[in-house]
């Protein structure tokens, strides 16, 4: 039923494959996992986990937290706190 409702939505508001994503604890994310993140009024998009925070840059609360390949700064994706997971769970693309 959710899929039928989603298909009836305007294309830019559809969740699509996000509906079938697997919910996992953020603490179980691995390098290379593809996770769904909100794109601020543009729906959800998949991003690849490429590292884990080291607690630097005055952000000790991000130590060990996964971050994704988003908000590049000369090859450094760890600099922007918006690239980190901020919830206890997240939705991932199936690990195959």
Image (spheres, helix red, strand yellow):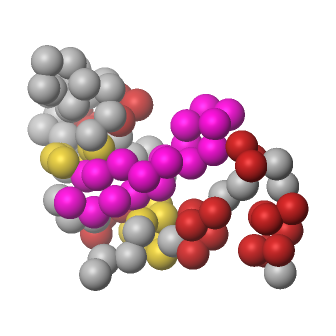
> Would residue 89 be visible to someone looking at this image?
no
Identify the residue at horizontal 20%, vertical 60% (top origin): 32
Picture quarter with the C terminus: bottom left
32 displayed left or right of 11? left
5 displayed left or right of 25? right
The quadrant in which residue 29 appears is bottom left
The quadrant in which residue 53 appears is top left
Q: Measured along the vertical axis of the image, is residue 17 above or below residue 74?
A: below
Q: Magenta span has 64?
A: no
Identify the residue at horizontal 29%, vertical 52% (top origin): 48
Q: Measured along the vertical axis of the image, is residue 22 above or below residue 67?
A: below
Q: Nearer the viewer, residue 86 or 37?
A: 37
Q: Nearer the viewer, residue 55 or 46?
A: 46
Identify the residue at horizontal 40%, vertical 57% (top origin): 35
Picture quarter with the N terminus: bottom right
> Would residue 56 be visible to someone looking at this image?
yes
Query: Count of labels shown?
Result: 0
Percent across and percent down for residue 4 are 82, 74
Percent across and percent down for residue 20 are 57, 75
Percent across and percent down for residue 38 are 55, 43
Q: Measured along the vertical axis of the image, is residue 91 above or below residue 42?
A: below
The quadrant in which residue 84 appears is top left
Identify the residue at horizontal 55%, vertical 37% (top origin): 39
Q: Magenta span has 34?
A: yes
Judged by its main secondary structure, the magenta piece is strand
Q: Which residues are magenta?
A: 32-49
Percent across and percent down for residue 89 are 46, 63
Q: Nearer the viewer, residue 73 or 11?
A: 11
């Amino acid at each position: 039923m959710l899929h039928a409702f989603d298909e009836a939505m305007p294309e830019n508001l559809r969740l699509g494959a996000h509906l079938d994503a697997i919910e996992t604890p953020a603490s179980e994310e691995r390098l290379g996992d593809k996770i769904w993140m909100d794109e601020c009024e543009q729906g959800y998009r998949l991003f690849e986990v490429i590292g884990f925070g080291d607690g630097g840059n005055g952000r000790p609360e991000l130590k060990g937290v996964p971050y994704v390949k988003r908000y590049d700064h000369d090859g450094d994706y760890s600099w922007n706190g918006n690239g980190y997971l901020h919830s206890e769970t997240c939705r991932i693309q199936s690990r195959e």
